[in-house]
Amino acid sequence: MPLIGMSGDTEGVSVSIDGVRRARFLYPVPRKPCTLSPGSEIGAHFEESKALVDEAIFSLTRFEESLSAFNDKTKPFEIRQEFDTNDNCWTYRFVTKEPFPKQLEAIAKSVVHNLRAALDLMVAAIVRGGGKGVSKQAGFPISKSAAAFERDLGAKLENVPAPVVKFIRRLKPYDGGSQALWALAQLDNLGKHNQLPPVGVAGVSVAVRTSMPGVFVAPDGSICLLGGPTGSTPFGHQLGFLIPEGLSPIRIENDVVELYRLDASIREVVNDVAVDAFVTIGPVSLTQNQPVLEIFTYLIHLVQRILNAIEHCAFRSYASESAE
C-alpha cells in the first residue's frame, strides 16, 4: 500500500506518495471587499455628471439582482465529474445549459456608458462655468497612448483652466497609464458595437484531506495518533478549501469547458472539488477576468473621485480669477 504524506508551509500544502511529491495546493488569498459610496457626494457644479453616476449605481444594483434571479431560476450551469481511464485521472467539466440573458448585457452597457459620459459632461460643465462655449470636440480625453493623449489634449480641453488640465495629465488617462480609465473607454466602445456580453469565469478549489489512518487534530491544534479528545478531526480537515497550484480562472466561452484534472493516485486526500464561478465582461486584456461587480464598483469609485477632485480644482481656479 503506498504511503501518502502531506506537508505544509506558509503558502500551501504538498502531497507526496512514497516520498515523491505528486501535487501542491495553495492557500486562497482573501478578497478585499469594495464598498460603494453614494453619488450624492458629488458637488452641485456637476449635476448632470452626478445624475449619470447615480444611474450607474442603480444599474449596478439591477445587474446584481438580475444575475441572481437568472441563476436561481434557471440553474444554467452544471459541474460534471468523469473518470478518464487513459490518463488515470478524474476530470471536472463546466457545462453551460442556458446562456446569459441579453438583459444583463444591456445593463452592463448602461453602467459603462453612463460613467464615460459623466466624465465628458464634467468637462462641458467646467467650460460653461468659465463663461465659454462648449466645442464639439470637448470631452474628457482617454487615448490609446501618451503621445495621442498629448495630441488630443488641446481640442478636448479647450477653455479648461490650466490647473484642471494639469490634474488630468497627472491621471494619465491612456493605455499604459491609467489602465482603469483606458478600460472604461474601451468597454464603452465595445458596448456601442454590441460586443459586451457577460462571460462566465470559473476557478477551482479543492478540500485537501489526508488518508493517513489514525492521525487527528485536537481542538487545541495538537496532533494526536490513534484518536484524540472530544472535538478532534482527521488531520487535514482543518485546511479547508485550497487552490491547485498553477491553475488560473478559466473563461467559460464554450458550452463545455474542462476545468481541472485530478490525478487518481491522490484522490484519497482530496475530499471535495468546488468551483467558484462568477461573471466578468470584456476581453481579458482589459478586465483581467475580474468579477464584473468588482469592476463596476471600482470604476464608479474612480469616476466619483475624479469628479470631486476636479470640481474643487476647477471652481477654485475660477474663484481666484474673479478675485483678481
Image (cartoon, rainbow, N blue to C red):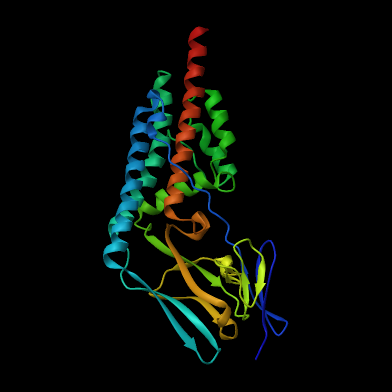
The quarter of the rendered structure image containing the N terminus is: bottom right
Is residue 158 visible to the viewer in this orientation of the structure?
A: no
**Residue 10 x/y as whole percent:** 69, 61
Q: Quadrant of residue 76?
A: bottom left
**Residue 310 x/y as whole percent:** 49, 28
Left or right relative to 68: residue 258: right
How many marks on residues? 0
Q: Nearer the viewer, residue 55 or 142?
A: 55
**Residue 52 x/y as whole percent:** 34, 37
Q: Nearer the viewer, residue 318 or 23?
A: 23
Q: Quadrant of residue 172?
A: top right
Q: Nearer the viewer, residue 56 or 212?
A: 212
Identity of the residue furthest to the front in this view: 229
Left or right relative to 34: residue 106: left
What's the residue at 44%, 45% (across, down)?
Answer: 297
What's the residue at 46%, 25% (across, down)?
Answer: 311
What's the residue at 32%, 73% (across, down)?
Answer: 97
What's the residue at 73%, 82% (across, down)?
Answer: 19
Left or right relative to 19: residue 294: left
Q: Is residue 137 above or below residue 99?
A: above
Is residue 311 visible to the viewer in this orientation of the structure?
A: yes
